[in-house]
Amino acid sequence: MDVALDLFGGEALDVSAELLSRPARLVSTADPEHVTRLGGSYLFVKPSTPDLTVLAGLVDAGRLAVHVERTFPLEQAAAAQRLVRAGHVRGKVVLEV
């Protein structure tokens, strides 16, 4: 791989580092100490209305896709949290309000 953006940390970060041609092309928003040890960089993300508007536009244009692993009703929030904690989610877990 040429570049990896990690949004979760943990084991996925290690796997991404192993697959990269250059460790400096690894970026994590989840685990600053771990990504730095692997030779990558940490990126702090603070959402803003303008940034979220740009992202929404990319989604609307079909240029950015978000994979939803599973959707839960709000009443099953505890089950959703257990799924995320298990560490095997490939995508987003959504709570419907």
Image (cartoon, rainbow, N blue to C red):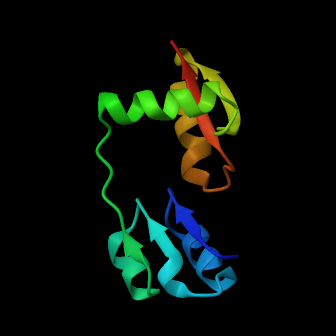
- Tell me if residue 79 can be seen: no
Q: Is residue 13 above or below residue 59?
A: below
Can you say whether 80 is above or below 12 in the image? above
66 up-or-down from 89: above or below: above
Q: Residue 24 in the image: x percent, y percent?
A: 48, 83
Residue 80: image quadrant is top right
* Residue depicted at 54% across the width and 27% down the height: 57
Q: Where is residue 49 in the image (x, y as percent from the top left)?
A: 31, 28
Expressed as whole percent of the image width and height from the top left, the position of residue 58 reads 58, 34
Quadrant where the N terminus is found in the figure: bottom right
Q: Can residue 11 be seen in this view?
A: yes
Q: Residue furthest top?
A: 97
In this rendering, the count of numbered labels is 0
Residue at horizontal 65 percent and vertical 45 percent from the top? 91
> For this view, does 74 lie left or right of residue 53?
right
Q: Nearer the viewer, residue 4 or 80?
A: 4
> x, y percentage for residue 66?
64, 38
Residue found 61% across the figure and 39% down from its top: 92
Identify the residue at horizontal 65%, vertical 87% (top origin): 21
In-image side of 61 versus 56 (left or right) = right
Query: In the depicted view, which residue is nearer to us: 61 or 23?
Result: 61
Relative horizontal placement of residue 79, taking residue 8 as reference (left or right):
right
The answer to whether residue 56 is left or right of residue 88 is left
Residue 31 image-quadrant placement = bottom left
